[in-house]
Structure formats: C-alpha cells, structure tokens
Image: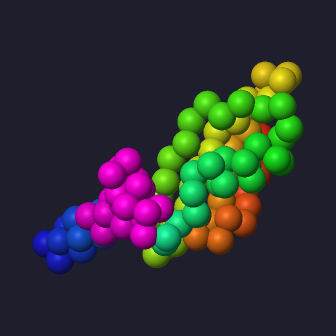
Amino acid sequence: MKTLTALIAASAFAVTAGYVHAKDLGPDEALRLRDAGTIQSFERLNTTALAKHPGSTITETELEQEYGKYVYQVELRDAKGVEWDVELDATQGQILKDHQDT
C-alpha cells in the first residue's frame, strides 16, 4: 500500500512540475507588464528577433513566465521557408535561444 501511495504521489508531482516551470501569459497580462515597464515593448523584441534572420516574417509570438523570468518566444519563417524559433529575455531583450524549427 505504501508503494502505491508513493507511486501516485510521484506521478502527481511529475505532472504538476511541468506546469509550474512555464506559464503562458495572456494578452491582457502581457500588455499590463509592458505598460508597467516590466518587459520591453513587443516592437523592440520583434525587431531583435528579426535582426537574427533578415528577410524573415513573424508567424507567431508568445509570452511565458519560466522559473520567474519572462520569456518572449518568436516563430519566424525566412525567405527560403525555413522556420526558426527565437527566445528572448523579455525584460532585457537579450536572445536566449535561436534554433531552426525541426
């Protein structure tokens, strides 16, 4: 019985651990953070992402809170049709990740 209880507890922890580390923020929350000066403007963040892949277009953006940091994710498609995922620190504007979408 103890083993079953421990297994159930471990399973519940594993399921909720993924949720706790990354939280999608909705448009209202994102605008509130921008207006408060907590994160940089979306225009500035988009410009930084586009500078990594000149001639690209933005196909999707998302703001998340990961481990207490605000991360702005930008999906791009370049002139050759290659898709790129660029993640930026939304507070500082620095690129955290830049990789080809597979």
Residue 29, placed above or below residue 38: above
Q: Is residue 46 left or right of residue 32?
A: right
Camera-nearest residue between 51 and 85: 51
Spot occupied by residue 44 in the image (x, y as percentages of width and height): 66, 54
Q: Kindly indicate the quadrant of the structure image that contains residue 7.
A: bottom left
Please state the extent of the stretch shown in magenta in the rendering. Answer: 12-36
Spot occupied by residue 95 in the image (x, y as percentages of width and height): 73, 61
Camera-nearest residue between 29 and 7: 29
Q: Main secondary structure of the magenta part?
A: helix
The quarter of the rendered structure image containing the C terminus is top right
Q: Specify whether residue 31 is painted magenta.
A: yes
Camera-nearest residue between 91 and 22: 91
Q: Specify whether residue 6 is painted magenta.
A: no
Residue 86, placed above or below residue 6: above
* Residue 12 showing in the rendered view: yes
- Residue furthest to the left in view is 1
The quarter of the rendered structure image containing the N terminus is bottom left
**Colouring rule applied to residues:** rainbow
Q: Residue at x 85, y 22 (%)?
A: 80
- Residue furthest to the front in view is 35
Q: Residue at x 58, y 63 (%)?
A: 40
Q: Is residue 98 left or right of residue 39?
A: right
Task: Give the number of callouts.
Answer: 0
Residue 11, placed above or below residue 83: below
Q: Residue at x 49, y 72 (%)?
A: 38
Spot occupied by residue 39 in the image (x, y as percentages of width and height): 53, 66
* Residue 25 showing in the rendered view: no
Camera-nearest residue between 94 and 87: 94
Q: Residue at x 86, y 38 (%)?
A: 54
